[in-house]
Amino acid sequence: LALQSASGAAAAWSVALPAAPPSAGSFRLCWCASPTVNASNSSNVSDYHLCHVPEAFLQDLGQLDVLGPAAGNEEQHRTCVSGRRCKLDGLRGLGFMLGDEILVLDTCGSGRVPARHASVGALVVPSSGDSTDMAVEWQGSPVMSLAGGQYRLCWCAGKRARLEDNSSSAEQALDSNSSACSASMDFRVDAGRLTVIGVAPLQQDRTCVSGQTCSFDGITGQDLSDLDAFMAMDTCSVDTAISRFAARPAPALGGARAAWDAERLTAAGGNYRLCWCAGGGGGGIVGGTNASN
């Protein structure tokens, strides 16, 4: 419930709107008379509704627009592939503006950022100019290198316009005091689910012996496929072939097993990176090659 001011001209919710409302959108503002309002002038206080149930709010006084992403529908769920470029199209909501941002978190509003997290994603206006249907592009490195798994797309409203308190029109003024989306805890609003296809966890160490064939299994992750492949390298995604190691990637047998068993490996002993690459094109992911560790 929103409590009115003493003058009855303003209303405020004493707690923040929930991080996961049914959806952003346009709603009705409904009014209920307090049982104490003008009670001294009424011969029957019971004429006034007790404002404790929705049915008591009979007077429609206008529209409330809740700005933010739409929630609770399957259209807000997206998929990216670890080690590839990631761009999210068609993120729907109400009142999106340039400066709004998306952050991938385990839980919206928490301070815990997943390991190897991509930079903050900026909302960009599509060619149609429709601010209710935005795309998300990641700043800095566009390659998504998170561990495979399920994450939340968390939205933060950037510096934006607000209605003047004394204006009944839709004229807006820049709110210079609007808080910036500077910390992970500022991203409180859940905009949907992001599925990242890839290996998980990111430290799945294995050992092979020089002079023997090399194979291993038990690699785990999200939606791994027979079309994926593994490669041993000095640095993942950099063309640093290991001398006297297999020059070709090993197919991910069942998505979880790799085998270089055509010949014995004679590479120098040492620590190398085990690198993974998604096969099959990634289904709608924009561009990109190479893998995450």
Image: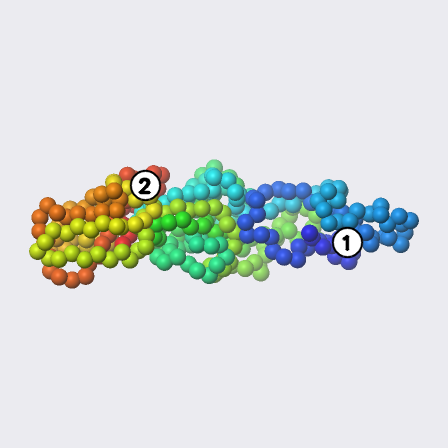
- Where disc 2 sits, the SS reads helix
**In-image side of 197 versus 154 (left or right):** left
Q: Percent from the top left, x then y, of residue 111?
A: 46, 61
Three-letter amino acid code at the position of disc 2: Gly
Q: Percent from the top left, x then y, of residue 246?
A: 13, 50
For marks 2 and 1, the one nearer the N-term is: 1
Labelled pair 2, 1 in contact (Cβ < 8 Å): no
What distance separates the C-alpha of mark 2 from that of mark 1?
56 Å
The image shows a total of numbered marks equal to 2
Q: Nearer the viewer, residue 244 or 177?
A: 244
**In-image side of 80 versus 228 (left or right):** right
Residue 131's disc is none
- Where disc 1 sits, the SS reads loop
Three-letter amino acid code at the position of disc 1: Gly
Instruction: Sort mark 2 into few (<14), some (14-19) or many (20+) by Cα contacts within 10 Å.
Output: some
Q: Residue at x 50, y 50 (%)?
A: 190
The image shows residue 284, relative to residue 210, as above or below, that is: above
Q: Residue at x 25, y 40 (%)?
A: 227
Instruction: Sort mark 1 into few (<14), some (14-19) or many (20+) by Cα contacts within 10 Å.
Output: few
Q: Residue at x 37, y 47 (%)?
A: 196
Q: Is residue 266 visible?
A: no
**In-image side of 168 versus 46 (left or right):** left
Q: Percent from the top left, x then y, of residue 74?
A: 47, 39
Residue 8's disc is 1
Q: Percent from the top left, x then y, of residue 43?
A: 91, 49
Q: Is residue 119 visible?
A: yes
**In-image side of 263 versus 54 (left or right):** left
Reading the image, the residue beneath label 2 is: 282
Q: Residue at x 10, y 57 (%)?
A: 210
